[in-house]
Amino acid sequence: MSTHATSPAATSSSVPARVVKWVDAAIVAAGVAVAISALVVMFVSLMAEVIVRYFTNQGMGWPTEMPNILFPWLVMGGIVLAAQRGQHIAVTAIHGWLGRGANRMLMVGHQVLVAAAFFYLAWVGLDVIEITGSEVYPVTGISARWAYMAMIVGFVGLGITALSTLVRLLIANDPFSVRAHHIEEDV
């Protein structure tokens, strides 16, 4: 009598695995693009402000507003990328007491809670956007809602990451292999 075990190769070729892999790749690409773009624009604008101030003893004004607008995007991009790589702080003391099946159930429950929390925060954030819509940065005239929008987009990214992690947990042979952080990749 043969048993039907799902091998890692078979799991990675399943339709849900391919969809999750595509979704995660899109989130990583968006997170990298947002973080790098925010960092570059902040650096270039502040460097331009320093150069103009050095040569003219007057500032341009608008570069000082760029960190207020773009820093939340940089932070949220980094947070989503850390979640994608499994690099957030985790308390794992309970995992040693549980078997593989119980750990899988605990991790699945955790991802359901995380997804629900971040999608709820994104929903509540829409009210914040409505409130902050009237605030405008004086020099650029840009609405403060663009800075607060980073929170909503980041929360949605974290919610989608939790859902893709949930699917990965359901199809993986070993729940501990899902979003496992490998220190050697950081070098």
Image: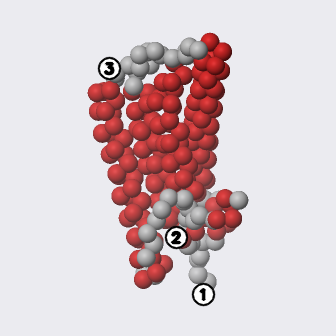
Q: At numbered mark 2, what does the secondary structure look like: helix, strand or loop?
A: helix
Pick whichever, 149 or 1, lies toward us: 149
Q: At numbered mark 1, what does the secondary structure look like: helix, strand or loop?
A: loop
Picture layout, residue 14 above or below residue 174: above
Task: Report which residue position mark 1 lands on.
Answer: 1
Task: Report which residue position mark 3 lands on.
Answer: 134
Pick whichever, 89 or 28, lies toward us: 89
Amino acid identity at mark 2: Pro
Task: For marks 2 and 1, give the CA distance.
Answer: 27 Å
Q: Is residue 160 left or right of residue 58?
A: left
Picture layout, residue 90 above or below residue 27: below
Amino acid identity at mark 1: Met
Residue at coordinates 32% horizontally, 20% vertically from top-left? 134
Residue 101 picture location, percent across and down:
45, 77
Pick whichever, 57 or 130, lies toward us: 57
- For the residues carrying marks 2 and 1, which lies nearer the camera in this image? 2
Pick whichever, 138 or 143, lies toward us: 138
Task: Report which residue position mark 2 lands on.
Answer: 175
Looking at marks 3 and 2 on the same chain, the residue that comes earlier in the sequence is marked by 3
Residue 183 picture location, percent across and down:
64, 65
Amino acid identity at mark 3: Ser
Residue at coordinates 59% horizontally, 76% vertically from top-left? 5
